[in-house]
Amino acid sequence: MLMNLFAMFFLVGLVSFGGGYAMIPLIQEEVLNRHHWMEAGQLADIVAVAGMSPGPIATNIAVAVGYREAGWLGAALAALAVVLPSFVLILAAGKLFFRYRDNPRVAAAFYGLRAVVVGLIVYAAFSFARHAGMMTATPDWRTWCQLAIFAGSLFALIYLHKHPFVVILLSGLVGIALYG
Amino acid sequence: MSDKRKLLLSLFLSFLKMSPFTFGGGYALIPAIEREVVEKKRWLRDEEIADLFAVSGTVPGAVAVNSAAFIGFRIAGVTGAIAALLGICLPTFALMVVLSIFYVQFKDNPKIEAAFTAIRATVAALIAFAAIKVARASIVDFASGTLATAAALLLFTGLHPLWVVALGAAAGIMLVQFRSATGKRTKLKEKEPVFDYMI
């Protein structure tokens, strides 16, 4: 169990290009389909809490999944696993990176990586919305309200330049008023 | 206390107090780190730290955590890297554990459940927003747009995300080589794109 937890988040840390949200598909695949640690809805809530709290998204998800599965030790181990690959890379290859940063082949690989990261995040948004119950064939008023909150939040982020924390806080209050 | 110990403690405390302001990957933290490390503590010079940030953005992982480790390493070796890393990680780690405990305690409370029904929709919006931001920096031509679309479609068909990442890097190299063989050039980014607090 602890080994699996460590191995999984080590992998996440190793390929975590383009930020934590791009890692959601991988975390879903491992947590839900491979290890069956929890329900999709529970993971969606963990992602929500991780997005609310300061700190890198991927590390926050690791801490919450680790804590849920194995308490303090699990949380510490998962956090260590996420951070370790980049830590080792920086210590061992800091100098190499300076040398190869301008290598055309490395630059070309990043050109491709950045493009697929967009695909990963788009997929993450869709699968998150599905797990959050926002994409049902028979939407009721709750679902319609969720879609309206989605649109409102996106508007506040893009055009009103609101900080994510503020948007989440307001959304929670709206939720209590609507569904409470 | 020896000078080395003092330096390690100072590194730890500097990053400890900045940690609660990392949101997402922590790109918003870069100016604060710069102020602390260059202007206040005078540990590094301006141009040194710019290079450190560039490498920290290239290595996988969150840029705030990577640059903390890198700066610590530059100033005080491996122990410095560990001190800075602990500083940047401990507060957010503790907060996340506290939130997890609260969530487990109160998730069945009707008010919290109601709040989360709405917050889930907002988090979906946050992810969509991150996608838009990254797309603006990464979709630079038709080929990269196609690659992004193909990646999303492959994920929907159930391909493992690790394969998508590997294929992306390989496709990037092949595309650029193919283009240079046919005499076209790809506009590669000279600088790492600077993302926001989102990712």
Image (cartoon, coloured by chain):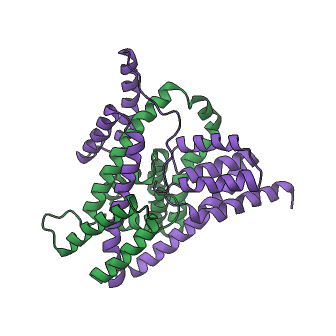
Q: Colour of chain B?
A: purple
Task: Name the residue rendered at 34%, 40% in the picture.
Answer: B164
Residue B176: image quadrant is top left
Residue A80 drawn at (x, y percent) = 56, 56
Task: Name the residue rendered at 67%, 44% in the picture.
Answer: B49
Residue A168 drawn at (x, y percent) = 40, 70
Residue A138: image quadrant is bottom left
**Residue nearest the observer in this picture, A177 or B79:** A177
Task: Name the residue rendered at 31%, 60% in the picture.
Answer: A128
Task: Name the residue rendered at 28%, 61% in the picture.
Answer: A129
Quadrant in which the C terminus of chain A is drawn: bottom left
Farthest-out residue, right: B2
Tell which chain the image draws in green: A
**Residue nearest the observer in this picture, A148 or B97:** A148
Residue A175: image quadrant is bottom left
Quadrant in which the N terminus of chain A is drawn: bottom left
Residue A53 drawn at (x, y percent) = 49, 67
Q: Is residue A37 visible?
A: no
